[in-house]
Image (spheres, rainbow, N blue to C red):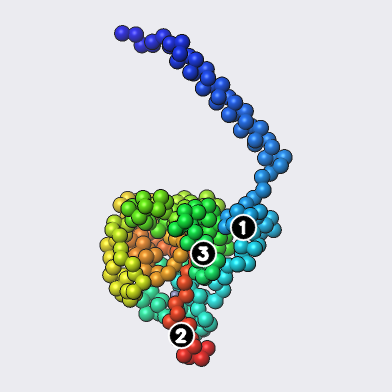
Amino acid sequence: MTLFSRPSLSSLRAWSKRALRDFAAFGRALVGAALDLVYPPPLLCGLCRGPASLSLEVALCTACLERLVPITSRCDLCGRAMARPRAKRGARALCHQCRTAPPALDYARAYASYQGYMRALIHSLKYQGELWIAQGLGELIAWMVAVDPGFQGVQLIVPVPLHPQRERERGFNQAAAIARVAGSLLGVPVVEAVVRTRETMPQTSLSWQERLRNLRGVFDVPSPRPVQGRGVLIVDDVYTTGATASGVALALKRAGSRRVCGAFAASSSLERDFLDAEARGV
Ligand SMILES: [Zn+2]
Ligand SMILES: [Zn+2]
């Protein structure tokens, strides 16, 4: 038995061709890197793919930012837009839901209201497969987390999971795509630590208690070690009922996470709060 067999002429030819190809690719990469140093490629806006505005801290354009409706007046806990949050001195201003049945999240914020341009962007991302929009939404989330002291102590990012069947149909999990962008900008590792064990019925017609019941046992942390004792940030595109993010937070806390926050590109306001506020004449 011989340890080394003599290479055939055809395998030598194939090898030399491959080596030449690799060498040419290496040369092209070198030239490309040198050109990038002299003429940096224009930065594209992560939402519309037009030129990004260089004056901004994020790779977005001012036209896109102006079309979004940032949440400025909000619930201190879940971050939903509230008409006029009022709290007694030293207390937190909470929305109706956080007063009556608070989510398992310790702190949550969304950049913009789930309406108009933001709603259209999220629909294009999820239902038309325009995956590059995840870049822009990740930029917004990273910026929001970086400047808000409420997010201090985040050590790990966990995206809200899709059921594997749904992910196969869609081809991607938009929350994971957004989380990867935010994680790389913030320098925080992203771990898909939570899995969805079964698909849930649409929740729009259910009450909050029914939604929580509907989600019981849906989320699982198969390998708890990476999340144990850590400050975790849940990332998703939109915070609507809050029940999903709360279910994920509960699973993480059961698995031993220390503090669980949530960061979302958008959140919908609770009409009830606006109606309450109107009824009180505020
Ligand atoms: Zn833009
Ligand atoms: Zn709230």
Residue located beneath label 2 in the image: 275
Q: Are marks 1 and 3 in contact (CB under 8 Å)?
A: no
In the image, residue 235 lies at what x, y percent?
Answer: 45, 59
In the image, residue 214 lies at what x, y percent?
Answer: 28, 68
Residue located beneath label 1 in the image: 60
- Distance, label 1 to label 3, CA atoms, is 17 Å
Amino acid on which the number 3 mark rests in the picture: Ala
Residue located beneath label 3 in the image: 120
- For this view, does 31 lie left or right of residue 140? right
Q: Quadrant of residue 149?
A: bottom right
Residue toward you, 79 or 163:
163
Residue toward you, 135 or 222:
135
Query: Which residue is outermost to the front?
Result: 128
> What is the crowding at mark 3: few (fewer than 14 residues within 10 Å), some, or many (at least 20)?
few
Amino acid on which the number 1 mark rests in the picture: Leu
Query: Which residue is outermost to the right?
Result: 38
- Distance, label 1 to label 2, CA atoms, is 35 Å
Ligand 1 under 8 Å from disc 1 Cβ: yes
Measured along the vertical axis of the image, is residue 88 above or below residue 98? below
> What is the crowding at mark 1: few (fewer than 14 residues within 10 Å), some, or many (at least 20)?
many
Image quadrant of ligand 1 equals bottom right
What secondary structure is marked by label 2?
A: helix
